[in-house]
Each structure stands twice: as structure tokens, then as C-alpha cells.
Image: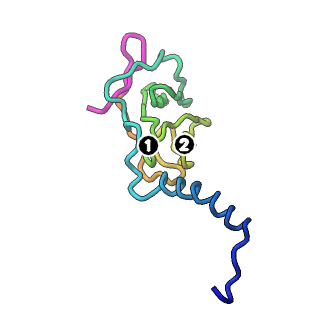
Amino acid sequence: MPGRPSPSRRTVLRGAALTPVAGTALAACGPGDDEGALPTTPTAPVELGAPEEIAEGSPVLYREQHVVVSRAGDGSLKAYSAVCTHGGCAIGTLEGKKLVCVCHGSEFDATTGEVLHSPARRPLVALDVREENGRVVAGPKH
């Protein structure tokens, strides 16, 4: 086209190299992405560990089972699914009382399930939790 300079080889190659990355990032975090790849709760009760492992105020993340459990001051247990409500990624990082999803940076309070940092908008799914035969067991709400 007259009057319009041709793009340099560097410009064309840079654009080609960035296109797949940008397309992947947009596809992974699009509208309606609240339905995740992993089930948001265990489908059956799962055995987690000994009750002594869970100290008051110090949540424990059970990565393989995708569950986080905490003990309140009165000794009661609370459990939440450790699957991000934004993209369905398994949450594998617990920093103090904060769960961090590495997929898109959502953060949750491990003791309440509440969202601390978006893009997640919904809190973690609460689970039934109990002590049974000397073990902590968590599962879907009934």
C-alpha cells in the first residue's frame, strides 16, 4: 500500500511469537470460567489424618485430597474444598492462613473460605468434617 511502511521482520516475528501466549491466557480465564476442571468437593468422605495434626488457628492443607481443615478456639473443626472457585485449579499453597491459587492468583482465607483476592468471586465450598476412629474425615455437605 502506498504511504504505509512495511513491518520489519522483527515486528512480524515478535507478533507471531506472542500470539499463542496471549490466546492461551485469554482462553484460560474467560467469562463463565467459574465452572472448574476439578470437582469442587470430594464426592465421598475422605480420610485426612490425625486430629492432633490440626492445631488451633493453624490450618492444614491436604493437597492430595484438595481439602483444607482448621480448628477453632472451641476445638471444633472446619473444612473447605481446596479447589479454586474461579478456574477449578487445585490450590497447593498455604501461607499462614491464606490459600493461594497459582493459576490466576486468587487468594482465600483458609479458616473461613472467604475470597481475599480476586479473580475468584465465590468463597471456597464448605465441607462436612468430623473425627472418626481417631482420624479426621471430610466430605460433601449433606
What residue is pinned by disc 2?
A: 101
User: Mark 1 falls on what kind of element?
Assistant: loop
The amino acid marked with disc number 2 is Cys
Left or right of 31 in this view: 12: right
| Segment colored magenta | 129-142
Instruction: State the residue in front, 114 or 75.
Output: 114
Q: Would you place residue 106 above or below residue 139 in this image?
A: below
How far apart marks 1 and 2 lie (CA) works out to 10 Å
What residue is pinned by disc 1?
A: 88
Residue depicted at x 36% and y 34%: 41
Q: Quadrant of the C terminus?
A: top left
The reply to whether discs 1 and 2 touch (Cβ–Cβ < 8 Å) is no
Label 2 neighbourhood size at 10 Å, few (<14), some (14-19), many (20+)?
A: many
Q: Residue furthest front?
A: 1
Total residue callouts: 2
Residue depicted at x 69% and y 74%: 7
**Depth-wise, is mark 1 or mark 2 nearer the camera?**
1
Q: Position of residue 116 (x, y in %)?
A: 53, 49
Q: Earlier in the sequence, mark 1 or mark 2?
A: 1
